[in-house]
Image (cartoon, helix red, strand yellow):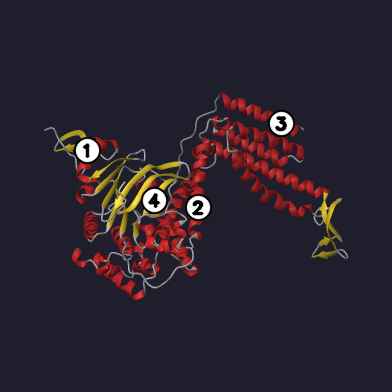
Amino acid sequence: MKNSIPDFLLQKHSSVGNIHFSSNARHAYLDKGLAYISHVLKTGHEQIEFANKDGFFQRLSPQTKLLFLLFFIIIVSVKRDIISELIIAVFILGLIVISRLNIVGLYKRVLILGFIFGFLVALPSSLNIFNHGMIMFSIVNLSSPYKIWRIPIPENIGVTRDGILIIVMLTLRVINSLAISFLVLYTTAFEDIIKALKMFKVPDAILITITLSYKYIFIFVKTVEDMYLAKKSRMIAYQNAEIRDWIVNRFAFLFRKTQKKYEDVFKAMSSRGFLSDIKLYSTQGLNKIDWFSGIIFLFIGVIVVWI
Amino acid sequence: MDIDNSIIRIENVSYFYYDKITALVDISMDVKEGDLFAIIGANGCGKSTLLHIMDGLLYPSTGNVYFKGKKISKDSLKDKDFLRYFRERVGYVFQDSDTQLFCPTVLDELLYGPLQLGINKDVSLQRAHEIMDMLDIGQLEHRQSYMLSDGEKKKVAIGSILTINPEVLLFDEPTNGLDPRTQAFVFDLILTLHDVKKTIVIATHDLSFVNELNAMVAVFSEEHRIIKMGNAEEILKDEALLLKANLIHEHKHYHGNKLHSHLHSHYLFHKHDY
């Protein structure tokens, strides 16, 4: 092969052109992409770690946890007073503490999502345009009231007492629902959640689809990470148009790869006897701690509903 | 540690994926100019991670990496002049060619590196054609990479690095999943590149490959540490070491009609008492 080695490969150093680079290398989009990928994978690992910790909720069976989830989400949704929502919030915080979860990390997510989907979504309802009532503080004074389509706009627009209560209520509901969901998700291994869902008669086809999708997320993310690294290993500078081309090209590649993967998975399922019915192994029954905890949860739930 | 002619120097490097999963523990080694260096170890021992760190794609959690005496770090690679200096001297052939090939056609793939480095278009094109001739892939010039066979993809992936003309070539499992003819081609190519004074670092668990290359070898344990370094001959005759590193094993197989088991490597150790 040596005879066909090009001369340039025999040179000690690369001959380079006259382009002079003076500024810092722009790799922000690659580094951000890699950081995000790491974050996704890290979150997955954290979930596995928390689910394997020796905490109170981790000892419960997945069926108990799912029943708890359903029961308390319903209570959170039907209660219409702030005191009950606050009691539930304190109760959930207590469960999170004795389950040895990362309180700061968990509540950071809960509060961000609660702010977006609770506070911000409900914010317009605080105005007297949508909820009549006593104005707590005024925002705008118009020269006269008028209508936009059929909505009457009052002369004095402001935040009402009822509106504030609605915002607090909705935000607390969202925060409580999220905290309950995260508590269950963080303390239950993914496969246990699937098996518990099977106990509740969720169709196997849905469960296998969820399982495959969940597993593929990690394969997919690893592939994307490798692509980013491969790009980084040969990149010095870039132009935006080139990056757009690369991203489009990689979309197409991932689509093909995904298509190939699901075809392979289907073949693998077929080769192991898959016809059309999906049969999953179901989980074990409840033990003493499940019954005991279940009764406590039921008792607390009834009290909260009653007050 | 002698660093006079060291081209890549690894100093007490440890790496943890996502701050949680251990990949490398206290790795120190020196790759000298013109070395043919093999990193061997079982799956998941950290070989690929070390190559990523050598190529400045990942940065050590602790410890330092130097290229020709200059530290490779996130900050140093933000300097475009240094980044260019580094990238034109170190090329990385990924294990999965699919992830490496991202340009529309094979020709674009071969041109990507030199154009990135500011080499003018005519020279880049000449390089691409010379490399295609050398790798015998001229007929693939206008083909899209996803339409190629695995062997062709590997050749294009290697070609896309060679057009940069790096001094150091990092190969991650270069013969993995290839047919015997392409494996032999890659083997010959690596020896040829070494013969023209390129520094080669290969991560592999293919002992026959290491034996034939007669490389300097670093053996990784499953605890992500280097457990021994030496020349291939010395390393490959140490059965206890290879067994500890999970590179040889005992399993059942037939000889004629006789089924038996003993320490076994498909390439090196196949010793019988009879």
Q: Is residue A67 above or below residue A172?
A: above
Residue A87, located in which quarter of the rendered image?
top right
Q: Residues within 10 Å of mark 3 (few under 14, many from 20)?
A: few
Q: Which mark is residue B65?
A: 4
Q: CA distance from mark 1 to mark 4?
A: 29 Å
**Badge 4 sits on which subunit?**
B
Q: Are marks 3 and 2 on the same chain?
A: yes
Tag 4, which secondary structure? strand
Task: Name which of mark 1 and mark 4 comes first in the sequence.
Answer: 4
Task: Name which of mark 3 and mark 2 comes first in the sequence.
Answer: 2
- Amino acid type, label 4: Val
Q: Nearer the viewer, residue B129 or A270?
A: B129
Q: CA distance from mark 1 to mark 2?
A: 42 Å
Viewer-side label of 3, 4: 4
Q: Is residue A235 above or below residue A115?
A: below
Instruction: Find disc 1 in the rendering and name its residue.
Output: B238
Tag 1, which secondary structure? loop
Query: Disc 4 vs disc 2: Cβ atoms closer than 8 Å?
Result: no
Query: Disc 1 vs disc 2: Cβ atoms closer than 8 Å?
Result: no
- Amino acid type, label 3: Val
Q: Are marks 1 and 4 on the same chain?
A: yes
Viewer-side label of 4, 2: 4
Q: CA distance from mark 3 to mark 1?
A: 70 Å
Instruction: Find disc 2 in the rendering and name its residue.
Output: A35
Q: Can residue A17 be seen at all in this image of the molecule?
A: yes
Instruction: Find disc 3 in the rendering and name its residue.
Output: A302
- Amino acid type, label 2: Ala
Please identify the residue farthest to the bottom as the structure is shown: B122
Viewer-side label of 3, 1: 1
The residue at 46%/51% (across/down) is: A221
Q: Residues within 10 Å of mark 2 (few under 14, many from 20)?
A: some
Query: Disc 1 vs disc 4: Cβ atoms closer than 8 Å?
Result: no
